[in-house]
Amino acid sequence: MRQPADSSRQIPPLLERVEELLRSLTVDERAGLTSGTDAWHAGGADSIGLGPMLTLDGPNGVRGPVFPPGSSATCTPCGTGLGATWDVDLVSEVAARIGLEAKRAGVHYMLGPVLNLVRSPLGGRDFEGYSEDPLLTAELAVAYVAGMQSQAVAACPKHLVANDSETHRRTVNCIVDERALREVYLLPFEAVARAGAWSMMAAYNRLNGVHGTENGPLIHDIVRDEWGWDGVMVSDWHATHDTLIAAGAGLDLEMPGPPLFFGPPLAAAVRRGEVDEEVLNSAARRILTLAARVGALRLEGAAPTAAASAEPSTAHATGAAAPQLLSDATAAALVRRAAAESFVLLTNDGALPLVPASLHRVAVLGPNAALPCTQGGGAANIDAPYAISPLEGLRAALPAGVEIVHEPGCKTDLFLPALSRMDAADLDGNPGLTLEIFRGREPAGTPVARLRMETSEVIVGDYVPPGVDATDYAYRLSAWLTPAVGGAHDIGLRGMGGRRLFVDGAPAADNWDAKAGVDMPAERFENEEQLATFQFEAGKRVLAVAEGHCNDSMARMLIVGCAAHETRDNMAAAVEAAASADVAIVVVGNDDVYEAEGHDRNTVTLPGRQDELIERVAAVNRKTVVVVNAGCPMDLPWADGVAAVVYAWLPGQEFGNALADVLLGVAEAGGRLPLTLARTSADYQAYDTTPDADERLIYSEGINVGYRGFDARGVEPRYAFGHGLGYTTFDYESLELAADGLAEGEALELRVKLRNTGTRPGKEVVQVYVADLEASVPRPPRELKGFAVVRLAPNESAELTLTLEDRDLGYWDTARHSWRIEPGRFEIQVGHSSRDIRLRAEFELA
Ligand code: BGC
């Protein structure tokens, strides 16, 4: 593993100034820095000119809460998509772009990247992490952190640690053995800590019995002392449970506000002598250091950090959202390229790339063709300026003479689709919906706020104006709907807390006395959708009104959905369209309810009748190209019976354009699998994420996560970790080791020569695995220890140099509680994937 240069260490004058400022603050002021003031701001200190610091989610773009109109943020590919690029430079570029937009929006902390691993294919947030492999995750995370912090915005890698699934996420007790923890789950956190991430987030879950915010041995002894990390440890939202334990464990910042355990309660505990004042000082010192690093704290006389001097933002100085556009054409071009680089071509019988001149009729089928899932649900979900669907992308890219027919074939929705500005008008007649907020429990009288919404999925808490009691307000979401077709329609309401729905004044749903829980993402999935059926006339508008109220400090959510009953056989229509087309492109996948924070899935099967759709289409059209729009591993039982399969992840706002680029050969599918796709769900060693009766989730596979487990058990995956095709071929010509042995403390240089033997320029991801041939403890048959991206023209060759550090060869010795580099023979395996090793060489570690 390469240890990147540390860009974060302070320049002494900065530290001295921070010390001076710290000494000038009272206990209350110092404690005020350690807690949130509202959902997204951390406390500042007026006496030293430090305003509240803004924290926002990440990781695939800058999430609201409320940007000025027209300033939505760029939506990039999701974590697994970026993971599939295996490209540290590209990931850094994407993160720098998000950082730039974050800075423009006045953000100081961006809550990402996600370093949890794709342990089970059912993990609700799999799409946010990069991969199943610790090294790939670590290297991409370091690149992301560097890109983000180059913009003077703190990255906040999350969630420390073993938050690899969502079921009972606030109480689950993940039982992880010491070796797996060190070699697998902590490794990415270690890499970003050593690389100087300015903050990090402590997870909800318990690890071996201890909550993330209370784990002193982890935060103090490992992260700070052993790894030498000086950043700010932030709690996950509402993950702090106790003042003394969390402060003693080394947590610096309780989020969100208003404070429950830090802030004033921490000051009181210091005064009572229950918390050592030095503990508070250390937390405040780290927070002020971060404030200085992001340019929020004026430090006359101190040399700025490299990052802080990058482009000082006026928004930073004030903490206020700057009224300027966040996304733009440069960002669009970047995320279009990144999406194409993330697509993994799993199989191709030669159907791709398509030759536009030979096409007359193209069938673009499947539920995700027109309604794609460009991003997952929950904290990662951002207000993107647009989302180009595959259908739109192909329409724009194919020559005018090519006829395009579209049929969805079936549905994926678990719930009714939320309304958007495309199908609703607000109370003023503009596209969108109207949200009104009222004081008190009833939505009556004059509203204190009236806003236009883009969709009917609204987190109301984000829009409550200052001055309104956050524990006593009501709200109303109104939309004029103009049905495109007449007949029966279902209309439904979901949400959190007391809520009800009317259609043209008639009651449609009533849950007015419902109590809100504490986990909005979980309730988004778990809470029942109340449904009613109405007969609508085509073109005759109806008024849908949803209302709710809030009587505690938990933010509220409303989701109104509507869909016409199906009156025709959509599956048959799709098959008919496929039969007469030159090529059938079937876009299948998930939606942002399946792939979301707050819950796990219970199957790897594509939702609805999508498998059947593919099989029936493939039966009538030999040239069936399947595009899988999913951020997590899904089952592909039909893969051998179709012409080509592209795994497209949740690719962000440029999905359709990037897909057209790849299908038409303007770009190559640059991705390689960052995770294993099994032949059957039974082949995944870690599958069920439900804790046992004692709330334990036992990581019984130990270090054998992902491909390591498939290799160790001799199970053939459907598509192996690292696999992915391009439109050209590469020959691996030679592997040379600079020495045939090395001693502890030394590094080993490898030289790999390869040549593009095809007819098109292309990308190869050279993967280096290591097998310990004489280990005294069980080790995985192979572990990824390095990789490099190379792009070559036809017949061009290149020699790459990769370096293995001795630590890359070691394992965690549980008897000595340290890394152990054990002498013996090792094999280096270099290849195209974990199951396609092209070159091998042995060496001896003395
Ligand atoms: C998520 C975090 C997120 C935070 C703020 C939590 O529910 O686990 O990833 O950063 O909310 O939205």
Image (spheres, rainbow, N blue to C red):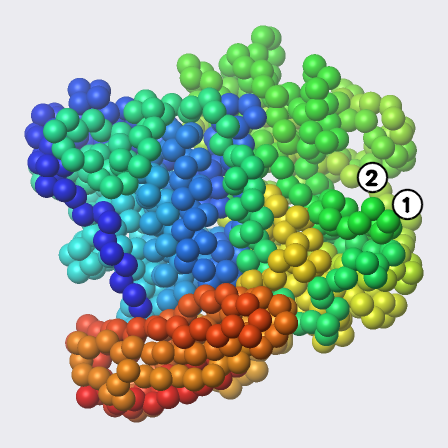
Where is residue 331 shown, x and y percent of the image? Answer: 52, 40
**Closer to us: 442 or 95:** 95
In the rendered view, would you say 164 is above or below 70?
A: below
Amino acid type, mark 1? Thr
Disc 1 marks which residue? Answer: 567
Which residue: 47% across, 18% down? 465
Q: Is residue 287 left or right of residue 569?
A: left
Report the quarter where the N terminus lies: bottom left
Find residue 481 and report its image quarter: top right
Which residue: 33% across, 49% down? 146
Where is residue 89 shown, x and y percent of the image? Answer: 41, 55
Amino acid type, mark 2? Ala
Instruction: Specify whether tag 2 is near ligand 1 (CB below 8 Å).
Output: no
Where is residue 475 shown, x and y percent of the image? Answer: 58, 21
Q: Secondary structure at mark 1?
A: loop
Outermost residue toward the front in this view: 795
Residue at mark 1 to residue at mark 2: CA–CA distance: 9 Å
Q: Does residue 676 appear in this view?
A: no
Marks 1 & 2, CB-CB < 8 Å contact = yes
Which residue: 83% across, 56% down? 362
Q: Is residue 114 left or right of residue 557?
A: left
In the rendered view, would you say 682 is above or below 458?
A: below
Tag shown at residue 506 = none
Which residue: 90% across, 63% down? 579
Disc 2 marks which residue? Answer: 564
Report the quarter where the C terminus lies: bottom left
